[in-house]
Amino acid sequence: MDGSASDRGQAGGELRLRCACGWETAGGEEAVVAATQEHGRRLHNMLPSREEVLAMAAATADAEAVRPDPLAPPTAAPGTPPEVPDRLDGR
């Protein structure tokens, strides 16, 4: 593997990165690296290396891959009736 975006599991060569502060960027490898370095310099007084940015982008992709959809209904075993609360207010 050569460390390209496709080797990191990024479809279509697009990367996505989310900073701990909530800032996000997405796009091609060069654009994400440049935007992230600029963000780090301007807002956090840090200048991550290209390798650090790419590692953060890969970590973001891994975290998103295992994160369940918050809007998806809870899953139950096949044949199990869905739980219905007695009251809508949850008491």
Image (spheres, rainbow, N blue to C red):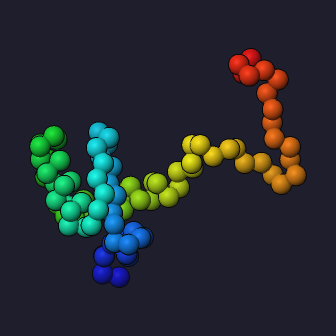
**Residue drawn at x 53%, y 55% as measured from the top left:** 66
* Corner quadrant of residue 27: bottom left
**Residue drawn at x 77%, y 48% as measured from the top left:** 76
Tag count in the figure? Answer: 0
Position of residue 47 relative to residue 43, above or below, is below
Position of residue 84 relative to residue 19, above or below, is above
82 displayed left or right of 39: right
62 displayed left or right of 48: right
The quadrant the N terminus occupies is bottom left
Q: Is residue 48 visible?
A: no
Q: Position of residue 54 (x, y in %)?
A: 28, 63
Q: Position of residue 18 (x, y in %)?
A: 33, 49
Q: Position of residue 81 (x, y in %)?
A: 86, 43
Instruction: Tell which of 14 and 33 is nearer to you.
Output: 14
Q: Is residue 85 visible?
A: yes
**Residue drawn at x 81%, y 52% as measured from the top left:** 77
36 displayed left or right of 26: left
The quadrant the C terminus occupies is top right
**Residue drawn at x 41%, y 59% as measured from the top left:** 61
Q: Position of residue 28 (x, y in %)?
A: 27, 67
* Corner quadrant of residue 88: top right
Instruction: Tell which of 87 and 60 is nearer to you.
Output: 87
Position of residue 37 relative to residue 87, above or below, is below
